[in-house]
Amino acid sequence: MICDMSVEKVLGGERVDAEEALELYRLPLPELGALADAVRQRLHPDRRVTYIIDRNINYTNVCDVYCTFCAFMREEKDDDSYVLSKEQIGAKIQELVDIDGVQVLLQGGHHPQLKIDYYLELLRYIREKFPQVNVHGFSPPEFTHFANVFGIPVKELIRQFKEAGLGSIPGGGGEILVDKVRKRIAPLKCSGQQWLDVMETAHGLGLNSSATMMFGHVETIEDRIEHLNLLRQVQDRTHGFTAFICWTFQNENTRLRVPSAGAHEYLRMQALARIFLDNFPNVQSSWVTQGPQIGQIALQFGANDFGSVMMEENVVSQAGATFRINEDTMKRLIAELGYEPHRRNNWYQLLN
């Protein structure tokens, strides 16, 4: 009976609470997917599916946080540790520009030795050489790390980074925003509240951001719903999140030895997120971790965006996710479901 009432609320455009979300989660997968698709159609009745051409650039793989789920990080003493120069990063961005790319996703490890000048000079260099490229960079854990290392408050850091050329902030490092979970999988990383505070601060300074969830490891379903609830609360106050993206934990080469969740669980959580996050304008399919076919199916489970063509990806690929597709394939996968594929920028403005 409770579930029937919750379904009616969703179909009527009403907000559901955490208890109702848990009931909806238990629906048969096709029913939950259809409900999420109804929400998606209400928010995006135009039959468009967007995507972006960008490139992930990880400026360093040196990190002193030692997250148990990460296969990417290295210590400074490791033979394959690196820090990219601004010229090396510029060469990568030039390759992106050559294929009409519009954004670079710039993230790295928590390097204990890099100075603030490295970051600010890099941003100024990109802005000068590639003014047409948005820098979507530096996740909340990085800003928390910078604040600790440089002794500068987060708000002032974000202000300086924005002045130097930062255009928006990615939702990396969210994992699950419940501290009992974070303490098990990443005890040295910022707290859930610190992650949320960075985002709210950035929104207040005029920077948009995305929000993420990496699930399917040691958390409960209730933890996932609390994560969504925390995001929804911030969005109620700021309206600064442009999109939500979730993906399943990839376990290859990591120290967190739990089985990875399957495609059904991914589709279930994405559908629930589309229903629960009623104040988020966009939900992005995660073909990078799930594969192109599941990414395509996700368009019928609440997603209205197919993410990035992504010239380069170095983090989840280290953990076993190695899917790649080009723009033509992406457009075909979108069109096969009867949608119109459209390029976009970070702010979901159409470019074609």
Image (spheres, rainbow, N blue to C red):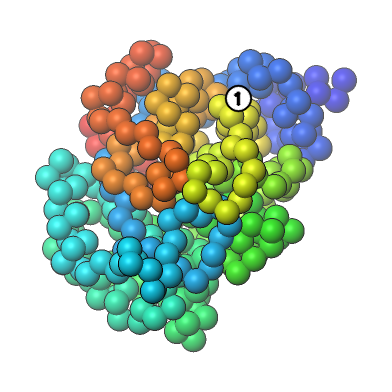
Coordinates of residue 295 in the picture (x, y in percent): 45, 27
Q: In the rendered view, would you say 147 is above or below 339?
A: below
Q: Who is closer to the viewer here, 248 or 3?
A: 248
Is 169 situated left or right of 278 in this image? Answer: left
Left or right: residue 134 compared with residue 179: left
Extreme bottom residue here?
Answer: 151
Tell me, yes or no, if residue 16 can be seen here.
yes
| 277 shown above or below 61 | above
Q: Quadrant of residue 197?
A: bottom right
User: Dot 1 surroundings within 10 Å: few (below 14), some, or many (20 or more)?
Assistant: few
- The residue at the point 19 percent across, 47 percent down is 96
Task: Identify which residue, 205 or 138, lies in the foreground.
Answer: 138
Mark 1 belongs to which amino acid? His
Q: Residue at x 80, y 19 (%)?
A: 4
User: Which residue does the image show at 39% across and 81% down from the upper left?
Assistant: 113
Residue with the most extreme front position? 79
Location of the N terminus (image quadrant)? top right
The front one of 222 and 340 is 222
Rendered location of residue 254, percent (x, y) = 53, 51
The vertical placement of 175 against 51, above or below, is below
Residue 162 in picture, x, y percent from top left: 35, 69
7 vs 80, left or right, is: right
Q: Which residue is rendered at x = 32% and y = 73% of the image? A: 119
Front residue of 339/86: it is: 86
Is residue 204 visible to us here?
no
Name the residue tied to disc 1.
264
- Name the image quarter holding the C terminus: top left
Expressed as whole percent of the image width and height from the top left, the position of residue 161 reads 36, 72
Helix, strand or loop status at disc 1: helix
